[in-house]
């Protein structure tokens, strides 16, 4: 009798970069890392790996320290940004531990040298890790002050030739206004890069959006707090908001 082989569910993308905020690790707390949130994120990533998708990650450090807020309180902006970068290294080590506890082989590559806990960032090595089905976590942003982790995510996504940049948030897409404050706010299903820039929508910072626009890298903004949403996005479900080239020259609302 022929042996039946189970096929992996189809996915829309071969290689993704998932951008997480540091706040995603806090859970219900005001700062720090919540083990349950960490475990849930790790499982969402594993679900994608199990589909055969090559997964890279960047994570912010806002749950520990945010460079911009430090600068606004009198600290030198460069010093504050370097502290924020080091916070992302802490989060990356925590996420690596959570992933490897559930059997996902992981590598951290840091833009700031931290040899005891991470490899230096080397583009070709990162791509090789991905080809071997290892999850790669990019830490410490670009290694330069005045650049956000959003910009770092856009840059790394293009360097590794990712098919899409997935921007994980606590909201289920991009709205015309803050939906928590304005019940009449409507959600965009699709936006062009220029729409985001002209309307000053808080998707990612303008440098990150411009990088994606110049290199035609689509962005999907979605709610990562709902279990399984990462898998739904990569399988092609129309959730969240997609930012790419305009369809027929206009963005469409939900």
Image: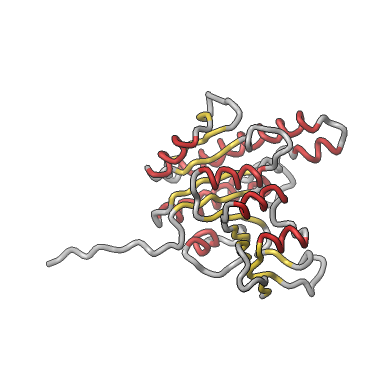
Q: Is residue 1 left or right of residue 74?
A: left
Residue 76 x %, y %: 82, 30
**Of the pair 92 and 113, the residue shown nearer to us:** 113
- Outermost residue to the right: 74
Residue 227 x %, y %: 55, 60
Q: Quadrant of residue 247?
A: bottom right
- Residue drawn at 46 percent across, 58 percent down: 13
- Numbered circles on residues, count: 0
**Of the pair 165 and 6, the residue shown nearer to us:** 165
- Outermost residue to the left: 1
**Of the pair 206 and 178, the residue shown nearer to us:** 206
- Residue drawn at 83 percent across, 31 percent down: 75
Residue 94 x %, y %: 57, 38
Q: Quadrant of residue 240?
A: bottom right
Quadrant into which the C terminus falls: bottom right
- Vertical comparison of 160 with 241: above or below: above
Q: Is residue 168 left or right of residue 30?
A: left
Colour setting: secondary structure
Quadrant into which the N terminus falls: bottom left
Q: Is residue 248 left or right of residue 179?
A: left
């Amino acid at each position: 009798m022929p042996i039946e082989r189970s096929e992996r569910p189809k996915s829309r993308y071969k290689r993704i970069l998932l951008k997480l905020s540091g706040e995603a690790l806090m859970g219900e707390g005001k700062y720090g890392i919540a083990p349950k949130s960490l475990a849930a994120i790790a499982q969402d990533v594993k679900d994608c790996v199990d589909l055969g998708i090559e997964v890279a990650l960047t994570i912010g450090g806002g749950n520990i320290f945010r460079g911009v807020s430090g600068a606004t309180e009198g600290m030198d902006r460069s010093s504050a940004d370097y502290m924020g970068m080091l916070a992302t290294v802490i989060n990356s080590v925590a996420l690596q531990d959570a992933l490897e506890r559930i059997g996902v082989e992981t590598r951290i590559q840091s833009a700031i040298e931290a040899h005891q806990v991470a490899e230096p960032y080397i583009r070709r090595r990162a791509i090789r890790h991905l080809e071997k089905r290892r999850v790669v976590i990019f830490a410490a942003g670009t290694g330069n002050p005045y650049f956000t982790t959003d910009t770092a995510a856009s840059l790394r996504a293009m360097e590794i030739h990712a098919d899409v940049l997935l921007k994980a948030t606590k909201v289920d897409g991009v709205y015309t206004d803050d939906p928590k404050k304005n019940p009449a706010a409507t959600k965009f299903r699709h936006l062009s890069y220029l729409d985001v820039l002209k309307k000053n929508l808080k998707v990612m910072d303008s440098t990150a959006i411009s990088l994606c626009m110049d290199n035609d890298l689509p962005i999907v903004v979605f709610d990562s707090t709902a279990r399984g949403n990462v898998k739904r996005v990569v399988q092609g479900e129309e959730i969240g908001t997609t930012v790419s080239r305009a369809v027929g020259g206009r963005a469409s609302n939900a």
